[in-house]
Image (cartoon, grey):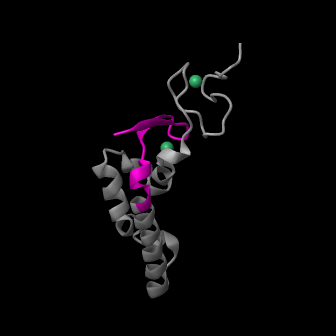
């Protein structure tokens, strides 16, 4: 199980590892299709669709890997390993992206004096 610091959740979370991403992404997109289909079939508004039920395989996937799914599927979809930057040498949290030149949490900038 790999963890990273999510600045949106303000805590360390379980990441969806790169090896799992394609499978997870497919489940997620299938679930979006299920919601669309449900709405077409029933003519209901998005708020009326049993979104959490339709996304159940996505929740199960994340929970099976030890993730806390209570943040909701829109958030844990952002917990893909590839979306996090490297671990900060100063504070141990993650840079927000792999392109970030400094740590937004503590201000550490690699290479700076
Ligand atoms: Zn998060
Ligand atoms: Zn830092």
- Residue 69 at x, y percent in the picture: 38, 50
**Can you say whether 6 is above or below 38 in the image?**
above
- Residue drawn at x 44%, y 53% is 72
Image-quadrant location for residue 59: bottom left
- The reply, left or right, for residue 62 in relation to residue 40 is left
Quarter of the picture containing the C terminus is top right
- The reply, left or right, for residue 36 in relation to residue 14 is right
- Residue that sits furthest to the top in the current view: 113
Front-most of 103 and 56? 103
Front-most of 29 and 36? 29
Image-quadrant location for residue 2: top left
- Residue drawn at x 31%, y 44% is 66
**Can you say whether 90 is above or below 41 in the image?**
above
- The reply, left or right, for residue 88 in relation to residue 69 is right
Front-most of 90 and 12? 90
- Residue drawn at x 66%, y 39% is 99
- Residue that sits furthest to the left in the current view: 64
- Residue drawn at x 64%, y 21% is 108
Determine if the magenta segment contains residue 19. Answer: yes
Determine if the magenta segment contains residue 60. Answer: no
- Residue 91 at x, y percent in the picture: 53, 21
- Residue 38 at x, y percent in the picture: 43, 80
Give the total number of marks visible in the rendering: 0
- Residue 6 at x, y percent in the picture: 51, 38
Quarter of the picture containing the N terminus is top left
**Can you say whether 61 is above or below 17 in the image?**
below
Q: What stretch is highlighted in magenta?
A: 1-22
């Amino acid at each position: 199980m790999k963890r990273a610091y999510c600045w949106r959740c303000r805590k360390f979370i379980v990441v969806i590892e790169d090896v799992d991403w394609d499978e997870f992404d497919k489940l997620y997109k299938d679930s979006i299709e299920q919601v669309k289909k449900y709405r077409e079939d029933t003519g209901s508004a998005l708020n009326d669709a049993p979104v959490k039920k339709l996304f159940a395989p996505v929740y199960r996937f994340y929970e099976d890997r030890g993730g806390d799914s209570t943040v909701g599927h829109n958030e844990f979809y952002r917990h893909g390993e590839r979306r996090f930057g490297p671990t900060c040498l100063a504070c141990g949290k993650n840079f927000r992206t792999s392109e970030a030149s400094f740590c937004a949490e503590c201000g550490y900038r690699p290479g700076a004096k």
